[in-house]
Amino acid sequence: PARRSSSAKVSVSRPAGPGWSSAGESPRPMRMLRCTARSAGPTTVPAGTLPAGWSSYADPSGAYTIGHPPGWEVQPVAANRTDFRDPATGAFVRVEWTDTPGADAAGAWREAEPGFRSRNANYEPLGIAEVPYRDYPAAMWEFRYGSRETLHTGNLGFIAAGRGYALMLRAPESEWTAVQPTFEQFKQAFLPA
């Protein structure tokens, strides 16, 4: 279906940079440096709207629904973590959730950042900032890292329906700009339970 029923409206920002959730494990936050996320202004669309041709996906635990583009592979990673991977580019969107969210998404990312930095080569923080995402308290953590290839990550954390969620985009640096519209569509298609 091209659209799921929902009376909720979504305010979608159009960033030129960041994305969301965790990096292998839920990363924790950092100090605000220079987040490259930019907003071209909100667009109001129904929450849970799937772009034409996308397939719907329901989390087996019932925590959310989302859609993914044709050809992208669904890869369950853990009970609360699923990757949606583009086999052509290596880019992926990870959806992760917890029943025990903290009170502040930006604060959670700042707590996670030192551990992530210590485990990952060539970590380059780009920033942690509160960002608009629907009417949820949300924050974006953006960074680059990698020893063989530079990977760019944007991790959108937010609280909805009593759960903490993260929508993370990770892509080779060379694919980062091109995959931004697709990440916006993932954010549009996401619907918490």
Image (spheres, rainbow, N blue to C red):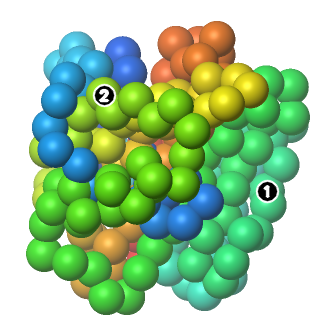
Front one among 150 and 35 = 150
- Left or right: residue 98 compared with residue 100: right
**For the point 15% across and 61% down, which residue is it?**
107
Q: Secondary structure at mark 2?
A: strand
Disc number for residue 160:
none
Front one among 82 and 34 = 34
Q: Is residue 118 above or below residue 152?
A: below
The residue where tag 2 is placed is 126
The residue where tag 1 is placed is 74
Marks 1 and 2: in contact by CB < 8 Å?
no
Q: Is residue 165 above or below residue 182?
A: below
**For the point 49% across and 48% down, which residue is it?**
168
The quarter of the picture where residue 193 lies is: bottom left
Residue 92 in percent (x, y) is at 67, 41
Residue 1 in percent (x, y) is at 67, 50
Q: Residues within 10 Å of mark 2 (few under 14, many from 20)?
A: many
Front one among 42 and 22 = 22
- Left or right: residue 29 compared with residue 25: left
Going by the numbered disc 2, the residue's amino acid type is: Leu
- Left or right: residue 157 compared with residue 106: right
**For the point 62% across and 32% down, which residue is it?**
146
Going by the numbered disc 1, the residue's amino acid type is: Val
Residue 52 in sight: no
